[in-house]
Each structure stands twice: as structure tokens, then as C-alpha cells.
Image (cartoon, grey):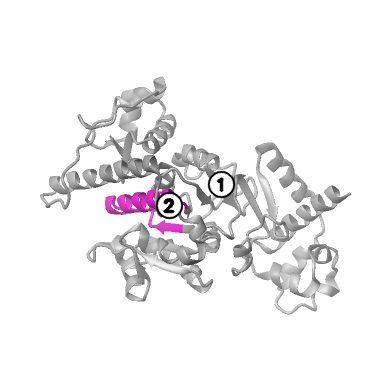
Amino acid sequence: MKHVEKLMHVEYWIWLQKAMGQGSAKPSLLLEHLGSIEAIYNAQLHDYITIIGLTRREITCLCDKSLDKSKTTIEKCMALGIKVITFEDEAYPQRLKNIYGPPCVLYIIGELAPVDDAVLIALVGTRQVTQYGIEVATKLAMGLAAHGAIVVSGLAMGVDTASHKGALKGGGRTYAVIGCGHDINYPASNRELKRLISSNGAVVSEYPPGSAPISMNFPIRNRIIAGLSLGTVVIEAGDKSGALITASIAAESGRDIFAVPGNIFSPMSMGSNRLLRDGAKPVCSVMDILEEYIERYGQNITLELPIEQSELFKEATQKLIGATNKAEKRRGESPSEPEITFGGTNVRKPQNLSSTQAAVYNVLSSQPIHVDDIALRANLEPRIVLSVLTALEIQGYARSFPGRRFVAF
């Protein structure tokens, strides 16, 4: 009997989210007035019209009691292996309940570990990322993951992608909050990354299967990124970047705002530099972030890394420094650290690669090559090449550049 009641409640929550729309604060209003999801579903027209704040369209939607679409959604989720968590479930993060317009339903692939006592940090920024932004996002994410924090981002191109990959390289967990249904791979180039994230963390959406990635979804989903996280770090953002929306939501929710200093002449740093001007905490290292949470969440932050993990992180960090220095040298700038080559004799030789991975890796060199050229030379489909490159990058054998270009690493 309890199982049937719980299933009915899931259907009710899906129904309510569809009636009110993602991002709406009206479900909270209805709960305040009517007390429970059952009461909201069983209420009638005369009950709804007494609640100040509901529009005529919303009341019309609430009066439609059909659960057919809810049942179809549940069936699709079961077939796709998607977990459904509703607002009243114990597994629903308390942090999300405290934001404006908390989602009625979360659709999850992977494992969303208990959030409320964990150190979740959002790393966000522009899709039109520069190489500097990629380097920073990767290094910060690796460091956060190595120290026990969970990196949250949005699986978009640019800073989001680099952040998720960095967390996986650091051996940690990462959560991706997407703006479409789980059955839609968007962006298509991150199909393999999405799979890896779900195996080492979770992919989260408030959109049911079949929901297209329309542009309005992404600013709405940003409140979940900010809401799950203790702090939001803006790595690189233009004057009108969606990352600034996430930062604004985080600030309104009482969360910490950090920003990475950027080139004052770069359009891609206008927004992040403005945040610094307006009082965001500057981030120049991982500890600039973690020091804010050591007192409250010290049990979840590993300050002294195990030797093997520390050495791996040091090696990866040195590679990042070396790659940056080589790029600076090509531009005629003076590197700040000794050059460490990549794509040459100092590259760690790949081990245990499949024939497809080896075919892709053998095309790479020290010069950036576009994914289409790699696919042509390896005689493979671009989508397969992108999946392989994602795996190679996380294993430390390849490195991405803006414009879907890659080098051996």
C-alpha cells in the first residue's frame, strides 16, 4: 500500500511541475496554502481561486487532473534507468528547498550522494572560453576534487566541460545539471563525458525525458547549479554571460561568490572582473576557495593528500604549466616556470589503449588538430572520435583547445 501511495505522490509531483512550469515558485505557494501534494492535486477550482498569486492559466492547468503524462514519464524513466526524486523525498537536498522556485522533481542518472553535508562548489563560465579559461577551470576542478570537494557545473561547452573533465582527472566526483531530458545528448560532443560523469557522480535535470534543450531552459537550470553549491566560482565570463546569472542567483540564495581575475582587455573577462570589482572573492588557487569551508566542513576536506594522489596531481599540474608556457613561448612571452614539453619525448606513453583509442591517439601531435581532421586521418566518424578524445583527455593522454582542437599530452 505504501508503495502505491509513493508512486501516486511521484505522479502528483510530475503533474504539478508540468502545470506550473520549471523554475516557478508557485508550487511552494500552493504547499503553503494547502499543506500537501495530495491536497494540491485534490483541490478544486474554488480552492485555487482563493490563493492570491495564481494566474488564470495556472488555475486552468491545475484543474486538469489527468495523470497520463505523469505515468508516461515514469515509464520512460524506468526504461532509461533514470531515478526520480520528488520534493518530499528524504533524498531531496535541503539546500535546494531553500532556493527560489525549488524543482518539484529531479531526474537523476548516477548517484547524487547526500548533498547537505558535502562541499559542493560550482565552476561556471563562458562557452566561448579562451585557453586561459580552460587551464584555470581544469586546474581548479582537479584541485577541488583531489581535496574532497564535488564540482558542480552545467555540461555546456567551454568552462563547464573543462571543469567536469578536471574533476574526473583529479579522481573526484562531479555533478552536471542539464537543461533538457536525459535522453537527449546536448551538446552532442559531450556524450561520452556525460556517461563518465554519471559513472563518477550524477547528471541531474528537472526536465523529463523528451524535453528539448531550448534556450530558455538554461538560465532556469542555473538556479539548481547555484542551489546545490556552497559557493559559485566564475572563471571566465563576458559582459552578458549566463554564468553571471548563476552568480546572481547564488548571491540571492546567500551563497558565496568567487571570481578568477582575467585580462582586463579580454571581452571574455569583463563579467568576471566586474564581479571582483563588486566584492566577489578573488580566486588564485584552490585554497582560496576551500579555506572558506574548512571550519564548517573540515571533515569532508582533505588537506593532506595521500602520496600517490598528491604525485598524480602534481604531475598533471606541471603538465598544465608546461603546456601554458609553451603557448606563451610561441607568442614571444616569457614563461613563469621551466618549460615542460608535451606531444614529444616527455609524453607519458599510453597504456592499455583499445585499437580505436590508439588510432585516434596516433594522429595527435604537439600541434592542435581539429576533430574533423582527426576523424579523417583515423578513418572514424567524428562522434566516435569525440568520445575517444574525451576518454584520452581524462586519462591524461590528450588535451583540448578552444575550437574543438586537440594535442597529444
Please name the residue shown 52% across and 50% down the image. Answer: 175
Looking at the image, how many numbered discs can be counted on the residues? 2
Across and down, in percent, residue 247 comes to 45, 67
Q: Measure the alpha-carbon separation of dots 1 and 2.
A: 19 Å
Residue tagged 2 = 147
Across and down, in percent, residue 32 comes to 74, 74
**Can residue 138 be found in the magenta stretch?**
yes
Question: Looking at this view, is 229 or 56 the one in front?
Answer: 229
Residue tagged 1 = 202
Q: Residues within 10 Å of mark 1 (few under 14, many from 20)?
A: many
* In this view, 148 is above or below 242: above
In front: label 1 or label 2: 2
The kind of secondary structure element at disc 1 is strand
Q: Name the residue furthest right.
A: 1
Residue 401 visible? The answer is no
The kind of secondary structure element at disc 2 is loop
Across and down, in percent, residue 23 comes to 61, 64
Q: Residues within 10 Å of mark 2 (few under 14, many from 20)?
A: many
Across and down, in percent, residue 217 comes to 55, 57
Q: Amino acid at mark 1?
A: Ala
Residue range of the region highlighted in magenta in the rendering: 122-148
Left or right of 296 in this view: 60: right
Q: Are marks 1 and 2 in contact (CB under 8 Å)?
A: no
Please name the residue shown 54% across and 45% down the image. Answer: 201
**Can residue 24 be found in the magenta stretch?**
no
